[in-house]
Image (cartoon, helix red, strand yellow):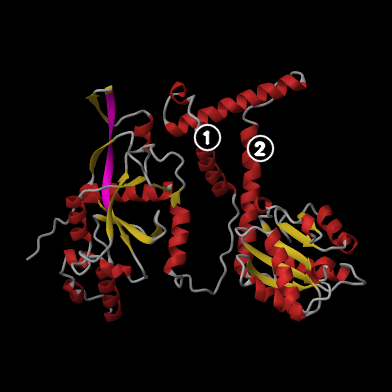
Amino acid sequence: MIRNNTQILIIDDVYEEVRNLISVLAKNGLSYVYNDGSEKMRPKKKLKYTGVRFVVLDINITKVTKGLPDEVKGAKLADLLTSCIAADNGPIFILFCTNDESVVDAVKKNLLRTELTLVGSLLLEKENGSVGKKALDELNKALDGSDLPESFNFFLSWEQNVDKARSLFVHDLATLCPMLNDDLENRIVRWDEEMKRLLGNLAVAYTGQEWKKIKTDSKIPDYATCMLNQSFVDKISKNGKTLTIPSENDFTSISIDALAKINTSLFLEKIIDEFKVDTGRVAYAIDEQMLGMIKKSVLNKDYIEKAHASLIYAVITPQCDLAHPRYLRSENTSSSGKKIDSWHRIVWGIEIEVDDDRYGDMFQKASDYCQRINFIDDLQSVSVEDKKKLKKYIQNCKPESIFSTSPLINVLGKKCIWVFHFASVTTKCLKEKQRFKYQMSRELVFDLQSKLANHVNRLGNNMLEC
């Protein structure tokens, strides 16, 4: 069954020919947009359609394709689609109202030169010039998901989960401030005032400062939005239905470019205020001594000089300490008067540019710190094959004092990885003009903090060796 949040774009220059289709969609509460394909109906550049997943396209649009050869028809129809659908729309599935495969092939060929992502198509033959019962049955079969690419079907289901969570989230938030029994106008005014107070409190929670200190800040809506976004993620996690991952695929075979883009999307967040000190903020720094020490500690000797590395640090002060506040502070007296400087816990690291998926060769392994892995050969109850696997595992393990990310995209658009060294944990005075370039996601911050805590609290190896 088609999801009720899926947007369908219908392009046909004769409305009567798709009236039955539109009637079925409307009765089932499905979202659709009708466009006759004419110049005056094409949306402005900034108003192009987004969220479109299915397109019902008539190939015989009089003012666009009449009297043209198939190749030119294909180019004109592809241009029509790109003029209506935004480049960042995402994948689409097209249902062509025709039985002429040559025109369909021409459209597909021309779409390859555009930014639209076509993931499949189906032919719908009109009956007596209109979309009849047979065509509607074919359409329902396609929209049911059985004939769709597995990954596309997965995204449709995920979008349905998000849409449902969005609706529930707004409902729950809006009803936190119930309308009181009063005349209609006063009820609306009071509800609006209560909601604005609630949003103001969200901004206070995000900044960790009193309202009187931020009430003139123009970024209050941004702060409130950040808190709403965090709460919304939790709502999706709690209410989202478990989805089935497309099967029979090698999930390890992914290019480093795609991997870096995915990681950046998942684990780095947009920074609203680049001067705000927050847990998980990452900045660049200049300290040749620190840079050199970390490079020598984490890189193989062959890469110490030739690796393109920059010094970075991440703020690891817990958010509860930022909110109360419970971090170190010092007075700084200057010509402009006394100022309070804040000192925060940080961990130093390096950002290394990478070109391919062999970047693992650049780093020292745990076995470089502990050369003795020959003890594995003495294990009596372990098979030869398992001994080989165990040795390989140990050789590929990273030192426990190192925390590294998978490939990311940095602010210059280059692929890189971050490597933090736990031996470098210290405090740093972060003044008002300190500019941060990245914000780690909560998941990445928690992972870094938990592994750092395990490292600090470790017992160490207390066994005697000969």
Instruction: Classify mark 1: residues with Cα within 10 Å, few (<14), some (14-19) or many (20+).
Output: many
- Mark 2, Cα crowd under 10 Å, few <14 / some 14-19 / many 20+, is few
User: Which quarter of the rendered picture does the N terminus lie within?
Assistant: bottom right
Q: Quadrant of the C terminus?
A: bottom left
Q: Splitting the image into 4 quarters, where does residue 106 fall? A: bottom right
Please give the residue where the numbered disc 2 appears in the rendered image: 171
Which residue is more in the foreground, 285 or 320? 285
Q: Looking at the picture, how far across and down is residue 445, in whole percent?
A: 38, 47
**Residue kind at label 1, given as amino acid type:** Ala
**Magenta highlight on residue 226:** no
Q: CA distance from mark 2 to mark 1?
A: 17 Å
Look at the magenta stretch and give its main secondary structure: strand
Of residue 218 and residue 441, the one placed in the foreground of this image is: 218
Disc 1 designates what residue? 224
Q: Which of the 4 image quadrants contains residue 376?
A: bottom left
> Relative to 71, is 277 on the left or the right?
left
The foreground one among 20 and 218 is 218
- Residue drawn 23% across and 24% down? 334
Secondary structure category for the residue under label 2: helix
Residue range highlighted in magenta: 339-349
